[in-house]
Amino acid sequence: MSPSRRSFLWTMGAAATAYGIQDTTRVFWSPEPASQAGWTPGIEKHLTSTCLVCPARCGIRGRVVDGSLIRLTGNSLHPMNRGGICPRGVAGVQMLYHPERIAAPLVRVGPRGGARWRAVSREDALVLLLERLRELRSAGHPETLALLAGFCSGTMEDVWRQFLTAYGSPNYVADDYQDGTESVMRLMHGIDRRPGYDLERAAFVLSFGAPLFESWWSPLQAFVAYADPDERNGQRPRFVQVDTRFSRTAAQAQEWVGIRPDTHGVLALGIAYVIIRDQLYDTRFVADHVSGFEDSIDAEGHLREGYRSMVLRSYRTEEVSAATGVPVERITSLARAFAENQPAIAVCGMDVTHAQRGLMAGMAVHSLNVLMGSVNRPGGVLFGQDPPVAPLVTPVMDDTATIGLARGPAGGAGPQLGAHGAANRFAGAVVDGEVTVDTILLYYSNPLASSIHPQTWRAALARVPFIVSFSPFLDETTSQADLVLPDLLPYERWQDASPPASYPYPVWGLARPLVDPGTSGMHSGDAVLALARQLGGSVAESLPYDSFETLLKQRARGLFAVRRGMLLGNAFERRNQRRMEERGWWLAEHAEFEPFWQDLVERGGWTDPFFDHTDPARLAQTASGRVELMPDAFARGAVAAGLGPASYLALDTVKSAASTDFPLRLIPYRLSTLASGTLALERWMSEAPSLFPNVHWNPWVEVHPETARALGFHDSDYVWVVSSRGRIRAQLKVFPGTAPDNVCLPYGLRHPDGALANPLQLLDGDHDVLSGLASWSSTFVRLERA
Amino acid sequence: MSSRLALSRGFSTVLTWLSPRRRLVWLLGVAVLVVATATVLRAARQAPVSQPIAFNHLIHTRDLELGCEFCHKYVRSGAHSGLPDAENCSLCHRVQLGTSEEAAKLTKMINDGEPLQFNKLFRLADHVFYTHRRHVGIAKLECQNCHGAIADTEQPPTRPLVQITMNLCLDCHRKRELTVDCNACHR
Amino acid sequence: MRERARIVTRWGMVIDLDRCTGCVACEVACKSENNIATVPPDQAAMGRAKSWMKVVAEVEGEFPDTSLHFYPRPCMQCDNPPCVKVCPVAATYINDEGTVAQIYARCIGCRYCANACPYTVKYFNWYGPEWADSERQHLNPDVSVRPKGVIEKCTFCHHRLQQAREDARAEGRVLREEDYQPACQEACPTAAIVFGDLENSTHRVRQLKDDPRSMRLMEDLGTAPKVYYLRPRE
């Protein structure tokens, strides 16, 4: 049967339609590549560096594809973090490519804070600053230059200090993380350094409010001790968390001891009471290395009560239990566990020292370590040393500089027993007109957002004619600046970055550019060196370095020459090195400096895994050569501060109480995931800042379910947290881990509009007169519907 | 379900409304329209690719016996095979070679420091993840498997010599008993 | 291919809850590795934030006798996946190595699978991803950027398996256990996440999944997840 004309046409038509439709679907369902124009070969590099996002300074590795930073992971050779990384470290890629980054140096146009800027070249911006600096010096007033140094350590700090010294300004004002423990150590050990904790070798870690797994000096150090203690055959120390709220650290510790705010020191002495009563302390260590334990007769023949008598007299478990809210049996069992699981460490957190009697409480906590001899021995408190890098040249000071320096720092030296709160004293001195400041340099400092006294700072900045910020983001304080010289971001710059003192072994970590820095910013270190060069004379002589990179390389020569330590290596290499150094051996890996430097850059830094526990200078450098349990300096300082002849053992002298207006106690705390307001927040972090499932992009306040019910609030309601000094809008989260009479407000969060919600700005301004640190948990608030 | 029913009912209504002769005319009309639209869209979909230099593959591959990798540097190691840049060409063309106008143009471009950017001819959709490394570097496939006789062209083609479709990939994968897991290419 | 698949491979994960500290490094590492975009605050408040790996916290008791348990929750990669059964277009399916894949180009966005999943680990793109131009630079070129209207989920970082296989072949060796690690495992600072082939007796997951502390989520549903949890020790 031959096909008819009609059926043939039918078939042809159908086939054509089908073909056409098939083709259209391909057009519609396969969108063309967006990246039509260019192509990239996908060439990949993995580079080692050091994280500069928080003070922990972990080793990192970056995956760079065709010049873009794609991923950040931990550097497995770094002895502190051993390949681990925290969420903020991972999110660093979003900081590097943050859309709000300042694209070029800016000069203010129009009124201050008016957000109108003119972009200038880096050279022009430097010239503007340079002219100002020249004028101040030629007018004979170099001391009117001040630096507010927030997040500043290592060579960057050395360069700033050297610059100010040679220039003639005594106003290096530190505005950084402080926990006051260096004051405790200075008083008791004569060593002015924050303590290191050998968590990894410890059998028992009793943490007094230290957020070990969240926002401690180095959470990664605690993570390694928790999960990977290769020094103790994989056996994990027992972690016990004493905390006012049920924190994430408390959740993951084997035991949580809920405690009333500001009573950490009392509990520590209650534990000391049981240890002394039951004769559980290290009698040999106390006899050989400690003074002030027993009663004594002083030179004038007066009886001086010792630590033992005072503790036994004043800190009976029943009284301690009543003060702290911890049951008597719990105190006894804690004391026994602490004494029997040696080596044990008592860690002093920021909650302890940020109190009206903070310094005393810090000393009380540390006295537990002294009682058990847990100092300068494996698994105890260790005093680390800085890495032995080559020093900068000796600063040269001309007459102008000498005169300027002699005028002394603005705001005075501060309290006798702890020079904290320098930034606030500085601001106060400027507002009161005690000092004149012409030019202020902001280096990773954002006091308008992060300070406890933003109003004072606002007034102080209004009195400063010229404000220069080195911030790469237009934060609150930078918005008030007259000139912005944006620093390069982490991952773009050379910097040395050593772990915090809590890690007791010296590490010289090196951060190096992972990506090409481009033209938007300028390395602040290079900017300072250029300023010094162009100021000429003694300032130039004091900083004779071409660039920050060459300066770092020069400093590494100290490590090359020191004949100890090693470049970063794996666990086997570290152990091997330590065993060799224990026996007094050291083998040179590199004969020349150049390959040493190349290898150092490749591996990410230098470390020395050997700790000399036999060195008595690492136990005490007091006049007596012994650890002072009852330091004379403290007694003198207490008298000078108007506390009378108090001992730090008289802890229960301050009471703060709720009122009908402000019935709830405010507990501010720092979040692991977030910064202090000087670096931009990454979107990933803002979207999911906590473990609360429905908190996004918002500050929140944690309230006990009963309290919320009594006040008529529901979960996720918006409330104002009101104190006598201000209020913060936050989302209410019902959380049964909060004590019924407390509310907990995390620090470091921003509202969706970018404003920082800083609970510290609600504080009543109480502070420890001995150390200068603000009291964090003596403020009371109420909740109002928003 | 009900919507499908309504659709087929509507379709049969249209069919009964049209006389058999009209049906045919309509069908042919629709067919022509669809093909025309498809052709236009297809043309819009991939515009003819032009190159800055009328590169002669044949001379380079047959007469000079240069391997593909000489200019497509990443063909064994990268996701993309790479296209030559001025630096690549300048290895030979810094001085005038041969007599052709294009060679003269190239030498002038190189010596004037003008950037030279060849345009990509073969493209895959965004949701296809392909690497040359896997196919050329490891599986040792010949280039003409997917690119046809590109090495024998004397003028740069404006359209791909081979339409690389999923079927082209799958045929080869089935023949060689390789993975046909969707996830191998789409992720 | 089917002949070659005689050596059975089933990729699986063991998460040691005793080691997990809830730091969420895994979450962020996953987002960075897999180009997971954030959603605007109002969308996030509606529960539309995406997190292929999500650390879930459960609180028990009240102050001062509170306890909190975390469990990081990726796609369970079920051997008997409910999501696959309901997909009308075969955009989600289980492959020869047991990984439940999601083919974005096929997905029609009906969200049946998201509703079928008892673990709620399938995420729908209600809007297109919002990346600033500068942020596009950190996107991983090995993973697609999902458009509006498709479902996305954890893939066990499948692209890394392909990369690892490619590397192994290029070096002429077999694939080793440590070659293929998902981003969450790589980032975990306490090594709580272990990943490997559940059928290979030399892999750690094989031993750990038979640990007495081992359990799976909602086992009674018969989904047969390939993500195992080790209960906390105390």
Image (tube, helix red, strand yellow):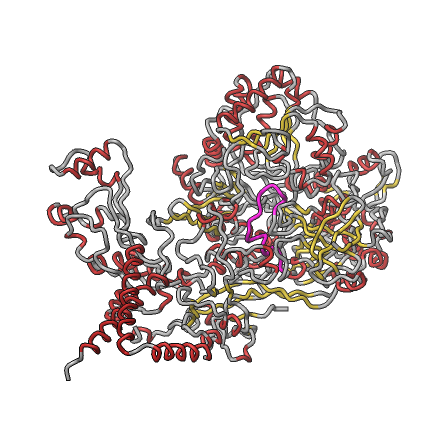
Residue C132 higher or lower than A399, as above or below:
below
Which of the image's four quarters has the N terminus of chain A?
Answer: bottom left
The stretch in magenta equals A675-691
Residue at 41 percent across and 62 percent down: it is C180
Q: Nearer the viewer, residue B87 or A727?
A: A727
Residue at 60 percent across and 25 percent down: it is A164
Q: Nearer the viewer, residue A182 or B71?
A: B71
Residue C14 appears at what percent x and percent y?
A: 50, 68
Residue situated furthest bottom in the rendering: A1
Q: Quadrant of residue A226?
A: bottom right
Q: Is residue C52 magenta?
A: no
Residue A269 in sight here: no
Residue at 60 percent across and 37 percent down: it is A444
Compared across the picture, whether A600 is left or right of A673 comes to left
Compared across the picture, whether A421 is left or right of C40 comes to right
Residue B182 appears at what percent x and percent y?
A: 36, 68
Residue situated furthest right in the rendering: A302
Residue B86 appears at what percent x and percent y?
A: 25, 39
Residue A292 appears at what percent x and percent y?
A: 79, 43
Residue A473 higher or lower than C89, as above or below:
above
Which of the image's four quarters has the C terminus of chain A?
Answer: bottom right
Compared across the picture, whether B44 is left or right of A360 comes to left
Q: Is residue A683 magenta?
A: yes
Residue A396 in sight here: yes
Q: Nearer the viewer, residue A426 or A750?
A: A750
